[in-house]
């Protein structure tokens, strides 16, 4: 994801289904209870200044979906509502394929969640139903969550849940992409550059949402596979403003980009190399890329989640 290639502004589409009755969530979208607690967010020394300083964040109990939203689940939402995504309205999406230069992204006419690599590659690069839906804007993510009486997690909720009690590491299990025992813990890009993917983790592009082990709280893809939209606006100085400690931060009141977290299949040693639990991705809310996805959250108090079912 790169803000430089973000699509032009167009009418937000989240309101399309916001007024519709809340639909029960698919069976696979049962929520995980996340306990209240506090954790250290950010670090005191980082190449990217927006990750500093380390500061204490307290998070109230909430609930979170264990996996990224899948292609099948998003299709069911579209079938039920007739929702048209931002990419379908814009008429294109941004994608990258093996063989391109680092940081090179291609604008593909007709690309959408139905064919993230474009219609011409739809057959060769067809997605599995259990892979995360991609080529979804922040508005598309909000629309899906609201349809099920849910919402996007905040950035702080997201990191707190993905760390699952771990502290001060790049991944929930430590600081190397391989877990104790030697297996890769996430789907990212192995190779000197994007000309060739060595596929050591088993996946060239996206992986099924339960392909890698969950973290200690049962959450899959805490890092890697696809960037995960969260509710916050992005600001470079968010952590500086929260440095004294904060409870349930929700980010700035306005901005130009929304935060996305975790990293994706495209992140490699040579581009997007800072991916992981510290990295603060950002894109314009209408940006549509073949490595952006999301999962939904809900409040513990059912009356505040407008009838969300679990
Ligand atoms: Ca991979």
Image: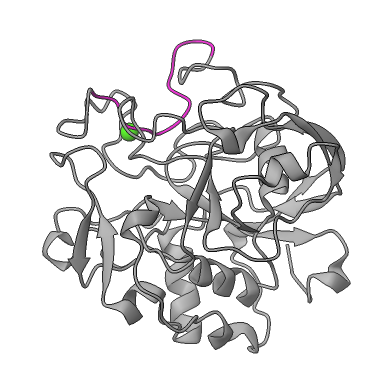
Magenta extent: 180-191
Residue 304's spot in the image, x, y percent? Answer: 84, 71
Above or below, comparing residue 208 to residue 54 in the picture? below
Front one among 43 and 182: 43
Residue located at (22% from left, 46% from top): 104
Q: Is residue 182 magenta?
A: yes
Q: Tell whether position 92 is magenta.
A: no
Toward which corner of the image does residue 244 lie, by quadrant? top right
Q: Quadrant of residue 168?
A: top right
x and y percentages locating residue 273 in the rendered image: 40, 29
Q: Where is residue 296 in the image (x, y as percent from the top left)?
A: 63, 59
Would residue 214 be seen by someone viewing this image from the given angle? no
- Residue name at image x 40 percent, y 34 percent: 187
Q: Give the residue at x 26% y 55%.
A: 95
**51 sits left or right of 80 in the view:** right
Tell me which image quadrant ligand 1 sits in.
top left
Q: In which quarter of the image is the C terminus?
A: bottom right
Task: Identify the residue at image location x=36%, y=62%.
Answer: 6
Judging depth in this view, the residue of 35 and 42 nearest the camera is 42
245 or 57: nearer the viewer: 245
From the viewer's perspective, is 277 left or right of 130? right
């Amino acid at each position: 994801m790169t803000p430089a290639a973000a699509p032009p502004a167009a009418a937000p589409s989240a309101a399309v289904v916001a007024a519709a009755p809340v639909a029960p969530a698919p069976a696979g979208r049962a929520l995980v209870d996340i306990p209240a607690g506090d954790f250290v967010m950010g670090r005191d020394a980082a190449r990217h200044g927006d990750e500093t300083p380390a500061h204490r964040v307290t998070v109230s109990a909430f609930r979170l979906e264990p996996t990224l939203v899948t292609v099948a689940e998003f299709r069911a939402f579209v079938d039920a509502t007739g929702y048209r995504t931002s990419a379908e309205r814009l008429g294109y999406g941004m994608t990258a394929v093996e063989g391109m230069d680092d940081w090179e992204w291609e604008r593909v006419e007709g690309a959408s969640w139905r064919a993230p690599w474009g219609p011409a590659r739809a057959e060769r690069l067809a997605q599995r139903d259990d892979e995360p839906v991609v080529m979804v804007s922040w508005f598309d993510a909000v629309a899906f969550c609201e349809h099920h009486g849910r919402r996007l997690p905040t950035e702080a909720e997201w990191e707190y849940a993905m760390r699952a009690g771990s502290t001060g590491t790049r991944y929930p299990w430590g600081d190397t992409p391989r877990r104790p025992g030697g297996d890769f813990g996430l789907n990212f890009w192995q190779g000197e550059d994007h000309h060739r993917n060595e596929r050591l983790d088993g996946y060239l592009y996206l992986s099924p949402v339960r392909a890698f082990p969950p973290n200690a709280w049962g959450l899959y893809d805490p890092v890697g596979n696809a960037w995960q939209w969260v509710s916050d606006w992005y600001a470079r100085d968010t952590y500086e403003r929260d440095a004294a400690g904060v409870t349930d931060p929700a980010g700035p009141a306005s901005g130009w980009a929304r935060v996305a977290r975790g990293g994706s299949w495209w992140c490699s040693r040579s581009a997007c190399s800072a991916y992981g639990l510290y990295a603060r991705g950002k894109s314009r809310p209408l940006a549509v890329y073949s490595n952006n996805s999301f999962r939904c959250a809900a409040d513990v108090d059912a009356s505040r989640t407008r009838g969300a079912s679990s």
